[in-house]
Image: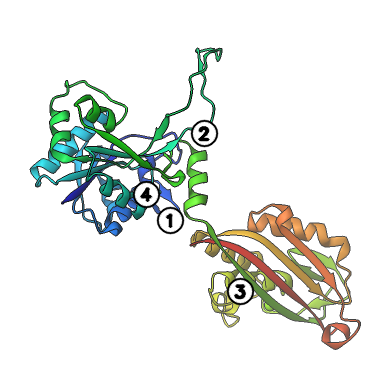
Amino acid sequence: MTCAALIVAAGKGLRAGGGLPKQYRNFAGRSMLRWSLEAFEGSGRVGQVVVAIDPADRAQFDAAAGDHAAFPVSGGATRTASVRAGLEALAVRGAPDHVLIHDAARPGLSGSTIAALLDALETADAVAPALAVADALKHADADGWVDADPPRTGLWRVQTPQGFRFAPLLAAYRALAPDASFEDDLAVARAAGMRARLVPGAIALGKITTQEDHDMMERMLAPASPRVATGFDAHRFGPGDHVTLCGVAIAHDKGLLGHSDADAGWHALTDALLGAIAAADIGAHFPPSDPQWRGANSEVFLRHAADLVRARGGRIAHVDLTLICERPKIGPYREAMRARTADVLAIGLECVSVKATTTERMGFAGREEGLAAQATATVLLPF
Ligand code: MG
């Protein structure tokens, strides 16, 4: 038995935001359409894949498909017209025994759903994944006044892909009036007398329509991987009238020596963020031998590390900093340090912790030869 897939991706779907049709928007690191292409390819049970697109979106389709062997066809003004165009393209390319018709806006397709559908097609003409309705059902008028309480027994929410014996479905579509429009392909098949059966669906197969759907499904299908890393730094005291820690200038009877502004707090934090994405250390990104960093504001280093985390698709969940010195006293400046750090990292104040301790006059910090800082950063990266 041969099986082809037809993905319907011709809609404009702008409600999910982002300015692009939703099927081409980034979904957890790759285009939403690509998720379905990879599911069909990875199943090992689907030969060719045809995608019904709006010809105006050809460039987005090519970028989304990448090296996947998917054949684009021009869709129509309605979903029904797009499916009809896709089926005709498959007929020309060598009619398969079975076809799975899928919405590009459902990225959570799994190999087990594909297998269950194809197994069910051995005894049915048409199959679809479906979830039992769990909520009570009401019918209401346009103003929200309930006028009926239909029973939910025997009612199902039907998803895609929907699978069909190809030849009778093609015949059913060819027999439709040119302006016919159906809510799904199972309805077309049943209207033509094909016997349809449901198999267990999946919450992950939910359709993405709004930005809220998009965010929720992204969290479900691509949960984040937490990375925790530490950083440490120390600078020696020298002549001066202030020290800069976490971007806050504090009057003091000494200054801190260093190539940049010697902000040990933000240096330790920069290293922690770089560590969370395994991107070497502050010295590798900003060599002390490079004169352009002489006296530099350490905000540049911290901002760079945060940008690198975001470029990896990561999110800074929390940072925790400990400043180690006898003097100056940190307490009066703690909130200003938190605020500056939260501002540079573009995260909430509640995600930034600044603490201070002494070493009971032991060691270099105790003798006030210098001060030290250690930091921990927690970053959430996409899997
Ligand atoms: Mg340093």
Q: Between disc 2 and disc 4, whose residue precedes?
A: 4
Q: Between disc 3 and disc 4, whose residue precedes?
A: 4
Residue at mark 3 to residue at mark 1: CA–CA distance: 34 Å
Residue 45 % position (x, y): 24, 55
In the rendered view, tell whether residue 29 sits above or below residue 215: below
Q: Secondary structure at mark 4?
A: loop
Disc 3 marks a residue whose amino acid type is Trp
Which of the numbered marks, if any, corresponds to residue 293?
A: 3
* Residue in the image at 32% along x and 27% along y: 183
Mark 4 sits near ligand 1, with its Cβ under 8 Å away: no
Which residue is denoted by mark 4 in the rendering?
109
Residue 23 % position (x, y): 36, 43
Most foreground residue, 378 or 86: 86
Disc 2 marks a residue whose amino acid type is Ala
Relative horizontal placement of residue 338, taking residue 87 as reference (left or right): right
Give the label, 3 or 1, closer to the camera: 1
Q: Secondary structure at mark 3?
A: helix
Most foreground residue, 129 or 236: 129
Give the label, 3 or 2, closer to the camera: 2
Q: Residues within 10 Å of mark 1 (few under 14, many from 20)?
A: few
Disc 1 marks a residue whose amino acid type is Gly
Q: Is residue 77 visible?
A: no
Which quadrant of the picture is home to ligand 1?
bottom right
Relative horizontal placement of residue 147, taking residue 249 as reference (left or right): left
Which residue is denoted by mark 2 in the rendering?
134
